[in-house]
Image: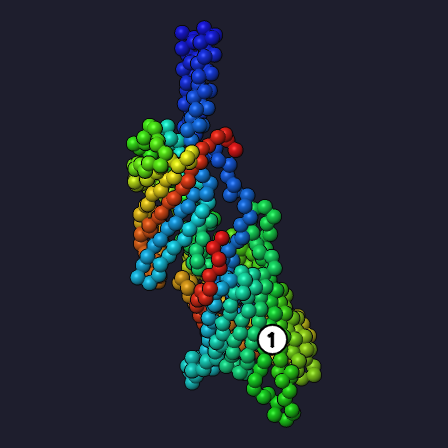
Amino acid sequence: MKKLILVAMISILWTGAITHAQKYFTKTGTVRFVSASTLEKIEAETKTANCILDIKTGALEMAILIKSFNFEKALMQEHFNEDYMESDKFPKATVKGILTNLSDSLVNGVKYEGQFKGTITIHGQSKPIESKVTYSLMTGSIQASTELKISLADFKIEIPSLVKDNIGKTVDIFINTKLELFKKPQ
Amino acid sequence: MKKYLLITICLLVGLSGKTQDMLSLLSDSTAKMKEPVTAIFKTTKVINLQSVENTAAGVFDFKLGHRFGFLNTGLKELFGLDQATMRLGGEFGLTNDLMVGIGRSTYEKTLDSYFKWRIIRQSTGSHSSPVTVSAFGSIALKTIRTNPERKNYIVDNLFYTGQLIIGAKINDGLSLQVSPTVVHRNLTLNSAEKNDVFAVGAGGRIKLTRHTSFNVEYIYILPDQISTEFKNSLSLGFDIETGGHVFQIHATNSTSMIEKGFISETVGDWADGGIHFGFNISRVFTLWRPKKK
């Protein structure tokens, strides 16, 4: 009996080791957003998004530091953090969910399309989200990208009436990541 | 029986391990990053005083200042609205921490130029600083002749200001700053006045909404330096920020909008209605964009 328990425990530990081997991650994901209005185009990019994907379960998580977004106009960046996103109060945006119809065996260089279902949290507000994700295995790493469209009102990002013509009401978000095999907790 | 129980427990432990936040596997490299504190004030001026803010690198900030006449001039002057004094100016950020500016005031037809250098920036995280410290220096040239009875040399009409500005964002709603100042006049009104005038300015803002704030500033002149007709400057006002513009509307007892004027030549008396209504408009233009990191 003791043997059986031992086998059971070892197998569970083993599964743990395998699940680690099935995780891909990055700390340098690119997230860009564009919001166009009649008067002004607002655009910013960060290259420090954290993302982790379990290719066995399809579980996907992402975290983006709001203050890491770079704008071309310094004042726009300041207002983005100070007036709209309240970055001191809500420092991160997160995405959490499941990437469904993941292929069991990925072939190098082939493009796959997956469906992502989950929750996106921006400015302390969570909303369900769905999007198409294209991904491919490239010699050991996974290249994945997606596009999202969100509405500012959904996330309680208020635009004062004085500047409502300068700021678009929806934002297009482009996410591009190159996920590397996750080996051990760092 | 026992073995099934143990296996179940093992399985449960294994499963619960899986449901934990995957992202926590990645060490958070951002947690201890040094982060500058931004937007201590909405613009580079509190009201008249220079704030601890700088114009960002490559950004030109157009400044228009306007003061109506004194409130106590009565109905004949429509309580000051008939008169106006203005200053047109602009400033430019050479780097994120060094800016230069020029301006011209209708009051005494004065030209002024200045720099502001942010030496220490308030920040959070490791090696952080609780305050921002900036150095400010200006030269002003008065171009009207004040004394027709003597020969006017250019140097007689030069004024210098040196200022240290120490400020901090206490919390999201409150920012405070203090600025020890010396104003040097090459020529004074009379021999009893000192050439160097030492003063301490203090300013603060309370955020009312995310786009508006209430500002106050007061400048205390150390005693026995200038004639008693001159008062300490007190100004109250509001900042209204709309993207690239900042509108500042205020009430102040100072007529001039440059340091040598509002620090050492303020004549208005709040108690007596010697108050100007006025406004500053700031509009930023991004002239060149810093290279992407």
Q: Is residue B14 above or below residue B65?
A: above
Q: Residue at x 55, y 48 (%)?
A: B34
Q: Quadrant of residue A8?
A: top left
Q: Is residue A131 above or below residue A7?
A: below
Q: Quadrant of residue A63?
A: top left
B217 to the left or right of A8: right
Indicate the quadrant containing the N terminus of chain A: top left, top right, bottom left or bottom right.
Answer: top left
Q: Residue at x 40, y 62 (%)?
A: B243
Specify the farthest residue to the bottom: B149
In this rendered view, identify the residue nearer to me: B54 or B255: B54
Q: Which residue position holds label 1?
A: B139
Q: Residue at x 43, y 55 (%)?
A: A71
Three-letter code for the amino acid on which mark 1 is drawn: Ile
Residue A122 picture location, percent across and down: 38, 45
Q: Secondary structure at mark 1?
A: strand
Query: Crowding near pointer 1: few (<14 within 10 Å), some, many (20+)?
Result: many
In this rendered view, identify the residue nearer to me: B261 or B74: B261
- Camera sees residue B290: yes
- Camera sees residue A124: no
